[in-house]
Image (cartoon, helix red, strand yellow):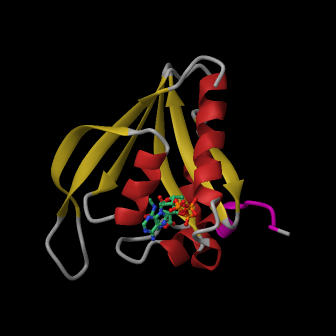
Amino acid sequence: MAKALTPAAMALTHAAAFTQSRPWSEGEFTSLLDSPLTFVSGDERCFALVRVVVDEAELLTIASHPDHQRQGLARAVMLKWQSQAAQLGAVTAFLEVATDNNPARHLYAGCGFSTCGNRPGYYTRQNSSPVDAVLMRQALPTGK
Ligand SMILES: CC(C)(COP(=O)(O)OP(=O)(O)OC[C@H]1O[C@@H](n2cnc3c(N)ncnc32)[C@H](O)[C@@H]1OP(=O)(O)O)[C@@H](O)C(=O)NCCC(=O)NCCS
């Protein structure tokens, strides 16, 4: 049984999942969730943090704990947050992903997102050169 999703639990899962970039702290999750524009989907095994501004939803982060990866949890969370965002009035969903993040790129493409832009050198790496960000979008059908 997964435990309640507190900012502390989110930070633990995020730190376990993000090995190539700086994980977000409990304090950062607390302040992000203080905003009325953000919501979280999932549980401590896998969660997504999303911001909805007027009719646009942005995936801020998604993380599956390594103990629970490749079990379909992220795909389920992707479907869930898009449904929640649509219910909040979003008609388009956006996200960005590092070009070298193949698991996430496969996940997003499989969930229907398509490339809409590029940010050169957007992500820093600890032991290598910065990598580009790919911007992706998807329309959210009304009532999805
Ligand atoms: C990306 C991530 C969230 C996927 O979580 P997950 O729970 O393992 O994903 P799922 O089991 O739901 O997989 C769904 C699909 O994603 C793709 N995928 C997931 N992990 C993959 C991997 N290691 N290699 C290639 N494709 C992968 C596959 O298409 C998979 O479908 P399939 O299992 O039928 O082949 C997880 O690897 C993670 O937390 N990574 C570190 C954090 C991160 O990079 N977040 C995204 C930042 S933009």
Q: Quadrant of the N terminus?
A: bottom right
> What's the residue at 66%, 23% (across, down)?
87
Q: Is residue 69 above or below residue 72?
A: below
**Residue 8 belongs to the span the image colors magenta:** yes
The location of residue 91, given as percent across then percent down, is: 50, 20
**Residue 123 belongs to the span the image colors magenta:** no
The location of residue 100, given as percent across then percent down, is: 27, 65
Is 99 displayed left or right of 7 in the figure?
left
Q: Is residue 11 above or below residue 35?
A: below
The location of residue 110, given as percent across then percent down, is: 46, 48
> What's the residue at 64%, 67% (across, down)?
71
Is 128 displayed left or right of 17 in the figure?
left
Identify which residue, 27 or 65, lies in the foreground.
65
> What's the residue at 34%, 38% (across, down)?
114
Q: Residue furthest front?
A: 110
Report the span colored magenta: 2-9
